[in-house]
């Protein structure tokens, strides 16, 4: 165990090194390098955490937690199935939907869209999309009115505004005496939403479920049921229980973790890769600690020899110089953690200020699915980074401390 005099001598040697120009500079670079490495690691991991949380929140605001669809693309007798699904205590809402593809035309502008037929009243209970409207509201979708709601990016690409008429062309043809004719219908744009997810804002269009059923000739059938789960993380288990135990099976089931698995898996892999790469900065700081302690050991050879002749053993010398490395490591780690947390908490505001100053935008929503740079600090990540950084610093002290403990008093004092 480290005794009081070892702590006293170790801290005195370290403070004495600060009065030596070059040794002081190397020690300062060790602390700064370690602080920078820890701070960068915390900021990067926080950005990845914020990106994941924001992406998850936006996905869940647009799509359902889970879906149950028919094997043949249609779901007959869905009112009875909905009633059975609602019997599950984990299911908060079950709403019917129709999912189809279409081409939208407005003047000279044409674009593909994913058509979602929804019940406006029930839709409010399943997702938060009804709260994402920037113009109009979901209640304006009325049966027989042939109204349509577009995502903001889709409306912009079509150059369409609320009140404009659009043609919806279904990818199915109708046989007429003149031959096959595409099935189309005029719709009136009554609302625009902005979910914050470019993937949906660019492709999703909402229509009233009965209008969608008439257009796609589905009769009283729907594509499936969309479920809102009390705990979204339990969606995979709950949707299987509903399909097998409540509905008797023979359905396709999916949930938000499966439909967006690639997003979250890529974030997890990226976090691991960045952690390893940026840990090299901490490794460089650890090498600087080795250099600092080696120079201190070389400078204090006479002092070490005197201490050895007074009865200090190799373990005492090992502890004396290990203290110095650990103090450097602890200082750099704590300063880095404080700096990293500070930067992460203010990163979004600073990025917005820099974008305003430079007149540019760093994140393209069409590529990153969001235009902001959110950051969320998780205490587990901070503890993990600090623990790994401090462990590397402790390992870096072993060689210089071992060299100090191996000093032979007679050889060290021979020329003194």
Image (cartoon, rainbow, N blue to C red):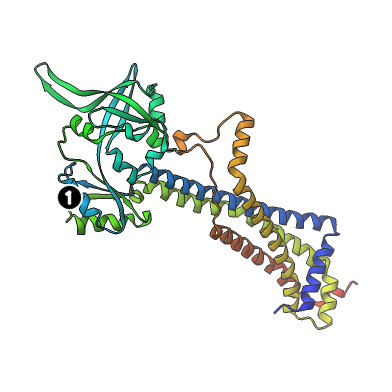
- Screen quadrant of the N terminus: bottom right
**Residue drawn where x is 52% and y is 39% of the image:** 372
In this picture, residue 209 sits left or right of residue 15: left
Q: Within 10 Å of the Cα at label 1, are there few (<14), some (14-19), or many (20+) other Cα atoms?
A: few
- The residue indicated by pointer 1 is 80
Q: Looking at the image, is 145 positioned above or below residue 403?
A: above
Quadrant hosting residue 320? bottom right
In this picture, residue 19 sits left or right of residue 35: right
Quadrant hosting residue 208? top left
Q: Looking at the image, is 177 positioned above or below residue 126?
A: above
In this picture, residue 95 sits left or right of residue 25: left
Extreme residue in the bottom direction: 311
Circle 1 SS class: helix
**Residue drawn where x is 58% and y is 61% of the image:** 383
**Residue drawn where x is 84% and y is 55% of the image:** 21
In this picture, residue 121 sits left or right of residue 268: left
Q: Nearer the viewer, residue 28 or 226?
A: 226
Task: Answer yes or no: is residue 203 visible.
Answer: yes
- Looking at the picture, how far across and down is residue 20, in whole percent? 85, 59
Q: Nearer the viewer, residue 279 or 305?
A: 279
């Amino acid at each position: 165990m480290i005794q009081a005099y070892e702590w006293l001598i170790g801290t005195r040697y370290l403070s004495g090194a600060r009065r030596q120009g070059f040794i002081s500079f190397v020690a300062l670079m060790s602390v700064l390098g370690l602080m920078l490495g820890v701070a960068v690691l915390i900021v990067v991991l926080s950005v990845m955490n914020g990106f994941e949380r924001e992406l998850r929140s936006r996905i869940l605001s647009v799509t359902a937690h889970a879906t149950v669809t028919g094997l043949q693309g249609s779901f007959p007798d869905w009112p009875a199935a909905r009633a059975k699904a609602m019997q599950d205590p984990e299911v908060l809402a079950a709403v019917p939907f129709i999912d189809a593809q279409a081409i939208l035309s407005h003047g000279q502008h044409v674009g593909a869209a994913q058509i979602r037929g929804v019940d406006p009243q029930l839709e409010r209970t399943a997702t938060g999309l009804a709260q994402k409207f920037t113009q109009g509201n979901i209640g304006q979708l009325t049966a027989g009115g042939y109204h349509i709601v577009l995502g903001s990016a889709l409306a912009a690409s079509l150059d369409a505004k609320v009140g404009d008429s659009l043609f919806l062309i279904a990818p199915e043809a109708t046989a007429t005496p003149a031959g096959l004719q595409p099935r189309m219908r005029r719709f009136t744009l009554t609302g625009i939403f902005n979910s914050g997810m470019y993937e949906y804002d660019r492709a999703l269009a909402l229509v009233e479920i009965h209008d969608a059923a008439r257009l796609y000739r589905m009769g009283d059938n729907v594509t499936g049921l969309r479920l809102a789960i009390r705990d979204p993380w339990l969606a995979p288990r709950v949707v299987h229980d509903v399909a097998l135990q409540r509905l008797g099976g023979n359905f396709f089931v999916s949930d938000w973790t499966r439909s967006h698995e690639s997003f979250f898996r890529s974030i997890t892999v990226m976090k691991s890769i960045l952690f390893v790469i940026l840990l090299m900065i901490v490794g460089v700081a650890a090498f600087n600690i080795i250099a600092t302690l080696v120079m201190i050991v070389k400078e204090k050879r006479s002092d070490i020899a005197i201490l050895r002749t007074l009865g200090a053993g190799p373990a005492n010398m090992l502890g004396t110089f290990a203290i110095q490395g650990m103090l450097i490591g602890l200082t750099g780690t704590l300063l880095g953690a404080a700096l990293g947390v500070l930067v992460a908490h203010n990163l979004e505001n600073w990025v917005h200020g820099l974008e305003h100053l430079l007149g540019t935008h760093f994140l393209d929503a069409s590529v990153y699915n969001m235009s902001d740079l959110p950051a969320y600090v998780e205490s587990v990540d901070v503890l993990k980074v600090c623990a790994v950084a401090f462990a590397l610093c402790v390992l870096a002290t072993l060689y210089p401390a071992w060299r100090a403990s191996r000093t032979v008093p007679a050889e060290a004092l021979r020329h003194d």
